Amino acid sequence: MGDIIFQATGRRKTSVARVIMKPGSGQIEVNRKPLEKYFPRETLQMIVRQPLELVGMHNKFDIKVNVTGGGLSGQAGAVRHAISRALLLVDSDLRPKLKKEGLLTRDPRMKERKKYGLAGARKRFQYSKR
């Protein structure tokens, strides 16, 4: 094998992303598809590339991502988290830079569960006086 690989996991909402980074030319593959195919929205692509752009390594690594669960937005956030964590394995001196941008924090916001007797998590059924 010979090549050094860096593996990391990232999470966001109900999505889990597993990332494998190897030195290369900057290709990003998500679930065996190119990044542009898997995340067609420009904003989602920017979210995924954010940690790499921040540390100036966007064309130093080939990245393979396996992501499951949730929707596209949650998945993009999970991939970003995983890439940020993998970059720490590459060079731990990047930590303050990534931390300042909040890329190492697991976003704790989840969907609130529906409660019994209510229409949704907090919405109530219409009140009828008679």
Image: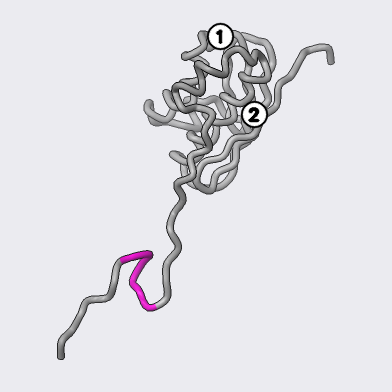
Nearer to me, 117 or 70 = 117
Residue linked to disc 2: 19
In magenta stretch: residue 14: no
Q: Main secondary structure of the magenta part?
A: loop
* Residue positioned 69% across, 16% down in the render: 22
Q: Quadrant of the C terminus?
A: bottom left
Q: How is the image coloured?
A: one colour
Q: Which residues are magenta?
A: 117-122
Amino acid type for the residue under numbered disc 1: Asn
Q: Quadrant of the N terminus?
A: top right
**In the shown orientation, is residue 46 left or right of residue 18?**
left
Number of marks in picture: 2
Residue linked to disc 1: 59
Where 120 falls versus 45 (above or below)? Answer: below
Where 111 falls versus 127 (above or below)? Answer: above
Residue furthest right in the image: 1
Nearer to me, 96 or 62 = 96
Where 125 falls versus 64 (above or below)? Answer: below
Secondary element type, mark 1 = loop
Where 56 falls versus 88 (above or below)? Answer: above
In magenta stretch: residue 121: yes
Q: Position of residue 55 (x, y in %)?
A: 51, 11
* Residue positioned 61% across, 12% down in the render: 93
* Residue positioned 44% across, 23% down in the render: 101
How packed mark 1 is, by other alpha carbons closer than 10 Å (few <14, some 14-19, many 20 or more), is some
